[in-house]
Image (cartoon, grey):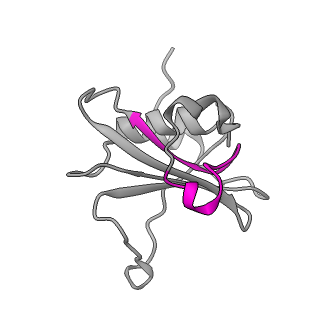
Amino acid sequence: MRNLHYLDHCRLDTMATHGSMGDEYNGAFKVRSETAPNQTMVVLASRGEGWDHVSVSLKKRCPTWHEMEQIKRLFFANDETAMQLHVPEGDHISYHPYALHLWRPLDAEIPRPPGWMVGPKKD
């Protein structure tokens, strides 16, 4: 995950009850959607237990693929892979009906299929 101090202008004070607004890897943020400028996403970022985690939510709908890609670019370095997980139904946990999550393990490389299995490369 990037050092999140560069997003301090978006940082929320919701963590003040814990004595901090966060640090370089933890915090709450408000980010305006690039594709729907009148929509604001609430983003919670954390690092712990071997994982980087970013939660993205809007008030009345789930984030779009483009909005998740925007958040991935803001919160993770260009050379980092982050993933969304679709776990077995019995493991579903939801605290917000319109939240999606990005995950990155700190101590392992996320396996990816070969590019040709996804589609041809653009020139």
Residue 41: image quadrant is top left
Horizontal side of 79 relative to 89 (left or right) equals right
Q: Does the stretch in magenta take in 19?
A: yes
Q: Nearer the viewer, residue 71 or 108?
A: 71
- Which of 38/89 is in front? 38
Q: Is residue 106 left or right of residue 65?
A: right
- Across and down, in percent, residue 11 comes to 53, 39
Q: Is residue 77 among the parts visible in the rendering?
A: no
Please state the horizontal and vertical placement of residue 73, each as a whole percent of the image.
Answer: 54, 32
Seen at 40% across and 47% down, the residue is 42
Quadrant of the drawing holding the N terminus: top right
- Residue extent of the magenta highlight: 14-31
Q: Give how far across and how far down residue 18 sits, in percent.
A: 61, 62
Q: Check residue 67 for magenta coloring.
A: no
Q: Is residue 71 visible?
A: yes
Q: Is residue 79 above or below residue 99?
A: above
In the image, residue 13 lies at what x, y percent?
51, 47
Residue 43 vertical position relative to residue 7 in the rendered view, above or below: below
Residue placed farthest to the left in the image? Answer: 60
Q: Residue at x 37, y 37 (%)?
A: 67
Q: What is the residue that sits farthest to the bottom in this orientation?
A: 90
Q: Say which residue appears at 42% left-offset and 35% top-offset.
A: 31
Q: Is residue 7 above or below residue 65?
A: above
* Number of numbered discs on residues: 0
